[in-house]
Amino acid sequence: MKQRPNRSGIFFSSLARQASRLLPLLFVTGTTLLLSSCTTTGTTGSGGIDGSGSVAGSLTPSQINHPMVKARDAQIAAEPPGNYYIGRRWWTDGTRFWGYLREPGKPWSTAKLVIMNESIMKQPDRVPEEGTAQVHGFDHNYEYRIWGSYTGRKIYDPNSNFVIPEFRLSKYELISQNPGFLFHPGEKYNPRHLPEIHPPFPAGT
């Protein structure tokens, strides 16, 4: 007596083969969606912070020479010199960078995007996870007077794909909770998008 072929077994074997072919495609699709959840609104080629670390290479002449920017630059030029920096918090969900630092008396077009080393002092928005209404990043666009020094290290932030200088924070004080625009009037902010003014992406990305 001949045995009938096990049709259910054949069906599930065929289904398993099809699933194995689909898994790589699903993985690539899922990875693409994950990476696109934190995207930049600017260019990712030669734009961004130039070799000197300043953001000037990412700003257009009309942005740098805007009357409101020029007026603010004149105010900044009157800042007293000293061993401190002016910092502006720029929070982007999921990333490690803190924001921008510039030297006193120098315009924001010379600022650098930094990662904070908190071995001496915690950054201003490092608050407890419970028992407070404030959350991480609550101080976006706050302006601070910052003390500390660059460590000389460059830190890779995998969530932004930036390589950023590390700054060891030793002290800070709040200057303003609402200082206005950072680089130019009309600049856009989205907590799920990388800043338009950013370091170059590593070669090959």
Image (cartoon, helix red, strand yellow):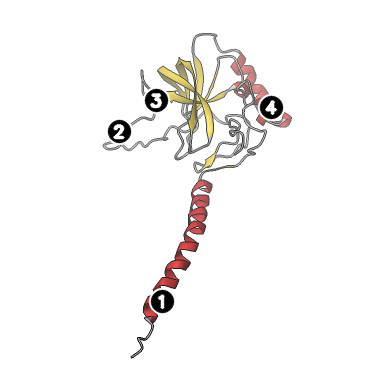
Circle number at residue 88: none
Q: Secondary structure at mark 3?
A: loop
Quadrant location, the C terminus = top right
Circle number at residue 64: 4
Residue at 52% x, 58% y is 25
Please name the residue that numbered disc 2 is placed on: 128
Task: Mark 3: give few (<14), some (14-19) or many (20+) Cα within 10 Å.
Answer: some
Q: Cα distance, mark 2 to mark 3?
A: 12 Å
Check contact, mark 2 vs mark 3: CB within 8 A.
no
Give the vertical position of 36 relative to 194 (above or below). below
Q: Is residue 13 left or right of residue 56?
A: left
Q: Cα distance, mark 3 to mark 4?
A: 30 Å
Q: Cα distance, mark 2 to mark 4?
A: 39 Å
Image coordinates for residue 62, horizontal then vertical, percent: 72, 31
Quadrant location, the N terminus = bottom left
Q: Quadrant of residue 58?
A: top right
Please name the residue that numbered disc 3 is placed on: 123
| Amino acid type, residue under disc 4 in the picture | Ile
Q: Secondary structure at mark 1?
A: helix
Give the vertical position of 175 relative to 138 (above or below). above
Q: Secondary structure at mark 2?
A: loop
The mark that comes first in sequence, 2 or 1, is 1
| Amino acid type, residue under disc 3 in the picture | Gln
Q: Is residue 155 left or right of residue 120?
A: right
The mark that comes first in sequence, 2 or 4, is 4
| Amino acid type, residue under disc 2 in the picture | Pro
